[in-house]
Amino acid sequence: MIIVLKRNISINDKEKIINYLQEKSFRVKEIVGDEESILGAVGHNGIDLREVEIMPGVAKVIPISKPYKLASREFKKSDTVFNVGPVTIGGNRVTVIAGPCAVESREQIIESAYAVKAAGAVMLRGGAFKPRTSPYSFQGLQEKGCQFLKEASELTGLPVVTEIVAPNDANMMKDYVDVFQIGARNMQNFELLKTMGKLGKPVILKRGLSATIEEWLMAAEYIMAEGNDNVILCERGIRTYENFTRNTLDLSAVPIIQQLSHLPVIVDPSHATGLRDKVSPMALAAVAAGANGLIVEVHPNPEVALSDGPQSLYPEQFEKLMCDIKVLAPVMDKELVTIPKTNPVQSIINKTEKHIGAAFQGVRGAYSEMAVYNYYGSEIGYPMPMPTFKDVFDAVLDGRAESGLIPLENSLAGSINENYDLLKCYSDISITGEVKVRVSHSIIGMKGSKLENIKEVYSHPQALAQCSAFIEKNGLKPIAHYDTAGAVKDISLLGDKTKAAIASSASADIYDMQILQEGIETHPGNYTRFAVIKREDVYETTDWNKVSMVFTIKDEQGSLSKYLSIFNKYNLNMTKIESRPVHGKPWSYTFYIDVMFDGDKSLFKEIEEELTNQAEDFRLLGLYQACK
Ligand code: PEP
Ligand code: MN
């Protein structure tokens, strides 16, 4: 029942009502609204409502006619809104949760977390326990999976959602998980519902395969009756006679739930349709229907997914979906939830265990990704794409990446100054290797497109300049883009057969595009040299023949030539010198020098000492093997 209180009720009278109801075994909850304050009372005992009605301070008593009480709009008029870490759910918000169906490995869930976060998801999903139709299918990594989820969460700052299948697992899972999911098959597993109610952590309650809306709300009531109000309802399609799609998405459930209940309702278009190309249209339809959020399956490599690959979006498709939601949400008077940028938590910094792969700047298919493969071979697993060079340095510094590959110079365009500046700033990072990549450009269009029909060509200005003869000969309009492989990715999303991109051949495959012609650069001798960076002491290696260093010299006449004479004295063969302005000190310079050293390594400390003494400021950047 709902007891509407008089505006001027005394604290004493209110307490008397609460005590009376509690004595009669009612659970009582006070809800303070702008216009009126009410007490919601739920219990098994029938009492004569008039006994409450006559108590001082009571304006009126309304019985709740629905079988579900706590979940009903009658009980609570305003939308339930709550936070999961930095993420808000409910009310006029659209909260997007994304990730793979299952946690398959540490690398896979971490890569997924970064990918969905980059696109704008605010929570990560991934099943550690997979209730599968067949007992022979992959059943999930279980506790290990929860640990990987937790790690991905710590790295990205995204709270995590995972399914619980048995009450016994709750204790083990609770410290790894931010939101528990109750799967469709368990919607009426009442013991599990009660356990989730007692545990008190937020719960996503999926609608059962053949559950009515009322049965679904009754399941929510089980969780709430144990004292947990943080329930999110999730429509994920129901069984009908239609079998073109995996299930039939009942989108009308969204406005119906919003009328019957104050709980947030989200939509899972992935399990609802089971078909990748139907996921985005239904996700947008769900936002248009007023859903409070989405939970979407996204996999970095759906072809090899251990479960639900055919319904998992490629990260690029998810990015496009998020762009569309950004446009649609305000039309529906909704705000797309974002989380503030955070630094990775301190606890993961200084970890000594081996970290995953190598970070590079750019998107998949970038020449920097080729550098990763050239250096490490194909065993590297997942190279980690990062938006900026600084992100690569940060990932290496805080342990998200074991190493990073950064371009230092191009044989046609010269040095990449930003990376020289970063090498100086990040004093805990050293160069541990180098690799050269031959930059050979291809023109890449949509599948089925023809070179003679291409009108516009997109790429990084440097790549456009390097292919200027080809562009002119074919009468193409060059359009500058921030990135080579990024241009291929964007053209693939546009689907226009008159547009093409200039990038590596590898990027054509990655974005399912077609190479129209390879080797279109004006000068075929185009190479980029990359440094491998690690958070490692320079003297950790004994296998080296090349030295990189950075220094500033004293402000005295002839000091540079005096300094360079040290190289001569020790027969150090200088292969590169680069100068950069010292920030904040106009007309002062920092010098970067590479030398080859094949002398007695035990003497090198002495050389280093001399170089240090003669400079104002000196640091060894790295000792490593030169590439051929
Ligand atoms: C899932 O989200 O991975 C899942 C198994 O969903 P459902 O319970 O809706 O089938
Ligand atoms: Mn799934």
Image (spheres, rainbow, N blue to C red):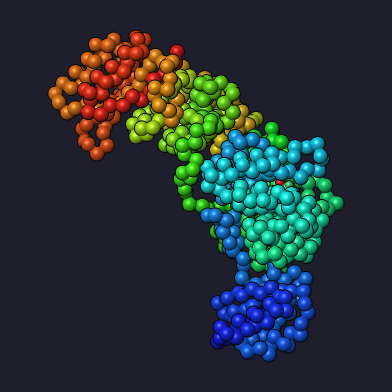
Residue 202, position as x, y percentages in the image = 63, 57
Please identify the quarter of the rendering in which residue 210 is found: bottom right
Q: Quadrant of the C terminus?
A: top left
- For the point 64% across and 73% down, the residue is 29
Residue 422, position as x, y percentages in the image = 37, 33
- For the point 73% across and 52% down, the residue is 167
Front in this rendered view, residue 465 or 452 = 465
Q: Residue furthest left?
A: 557
Residue 18, position as x, y percentages in the image = 64, 79
Front in this rendered view, residue 608 or 320 = 608
Front in this rendered view, residue 442 or 395 = 395
Q: How many numbered marks does the figure carry? A: 0
Q: Is residue 409 visible?
A: no
Compared with 96, 226 (above or below) is: below
Q: Quadrant of the N terminus?
A: bottom right
96 vs 562, left or right, is right
Please identify the quarter of the rendering in which residue 44 is found: bottom right
Please identify the quarter of the rendering in which residue 107 is found: top right
Q: Is residue 384 visible?
A: yes
- For the point 21% across and 32% down, the residue is 587
Compared with 260, 575 (above or below) is: above
- For the point 44% across and 35% down, the residue is 397
Compared with 7, 587 (above or below) is: above
Residue 199, position as x, y percentages in the image = 66, 58
Q: Residue furthest right?
A: 241
